[in-house]
Image (cartoon, rainbow, N blue to C red):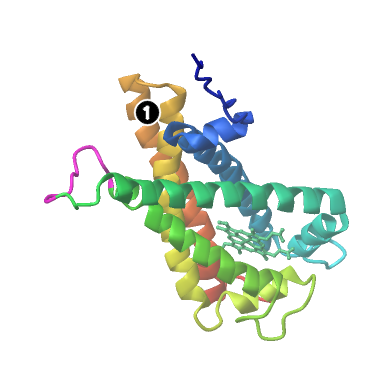
Amino acid sequence: MSVATKTVTAPPSFSRVGVLWASTVGKKALMALTGILLSLFVLGHLLGNLQLYFGRDSTGAYLINKYAEFLHHNKPLLYGTRTVLLVAVLIHVIAAFQLQLGKGAARPVEYHQKESVNSTVSSRYMFWTGVVIFFFVIYHLLQLTLGVVNVPGFREGDVFHNVTVGLRTGVAPLFYVVGMIGLGLHLRHGLYSTFQSLGAGNPAVSQWALKWAAVVATVIALVNLSFPLAVLAGLVKG
Ligand code: HEM
């Protein structure tokens, strides 16, 4: 009599990130983590850009140009930040697409009536406000980092000139206004979800989170919007 033997194949070994990536909950956690990193960049970038309002130092150099020069000369800081940002953006965007596609696959037939209970405009349009930010950043890099669109006479290293000329040229004001509305809505829901997960399930924390996420996101969007508006109004000019 022959005994049938069954070959048992070892389960694939996943790294911790791989395990997180394999589940919907894990992907959402990775999106939250990368979202926090990207929000910190947005905040730091905004604080740096505030120097547009402080003009020149005693030597006559624009403060924002000196700040940019410091960043560009500090190569480990510059390339370290760029690498972390790029990896964070890739994880955030790929996870967003996979989760969005997964939603469609889980429900191939559309709801007859879309649910709106407990969902705000920003939560329902999270994916689409993310797409708006993505295209804003592509335009922004082409404009102010590479100088290939909408900055007549782009000057390498002269950030003050590039911003004061660029933000009022061609379609730039439209990109900045639409981009910052998208950023405000996206941050509002992203921050709310993050605060909420930190105090999971506590209704008092949830109320607090809703209020503070709205305040922080609105302030960030409005301060960013103030730059193109100040340039258009001629309040900041070279
Ligand atoms: C009106 C608001 C903003 C202004 C005036 C502004 C200004 C600038 C300027 C002048 C640069 C080039 C810096 C340099 O070459 O040294 C830059 C780079 C950049 N900005 Fe903005 N920015 C704004 C909003 C944003 C927002 C909201 C985001 C992200 C959502 C963003 C993401 C970036 C990125 C990723 C870079 C490239 C950084 C690098 O070179 O490594 N910016 N920005």
- Residue 42 percent across, percent down from the top left: 59, 50
Q: Who's the residue at 45% across and 67% down the image?
A: 177
Magenta segment: does it hold 98?
Answer: no
Answer with left or right where residue 35 lies relative to residue 112. right
Between 223 and 7, the one lying in front of the other is 7
> In the image, is residue 104 above or below residue 21?
below
- Residue 65 percent across, percent down from the top left: 78, 64
- Residue 126 percent across, percent down from the top left: 38, 50
- Residue behind mark 1: 208
Q: Who's the residue at 51% across and 41% down the image?
A: 31
Q: Quadrant of residue 165?
A: bottom right
Q: Secondary structure at mark 1?
A: helix
> In the image, is residue 55 above or below residue 22?
below
Query: Would the CB of label 1 be found within 8 Å of ligand 1?
Result: no
Tell me, yes or no, if residue 233 can be seen here. Answer: no
* Amino acid marked by disc 1: Trp
Q: Quadrant of residue 57?
A: bottom right
Between 15 and 210, the one lying in front of the other is 15
- Tag 1: Cα neighbours inside 10 Å, few (<14), some, or many (≥20)? few
> In the image, is residue 194 above or below residue 137?
above
- Residue 141 percent across, percent down from the top left: 64, 68
Ligand 1 positioned in quadrant: bottom right
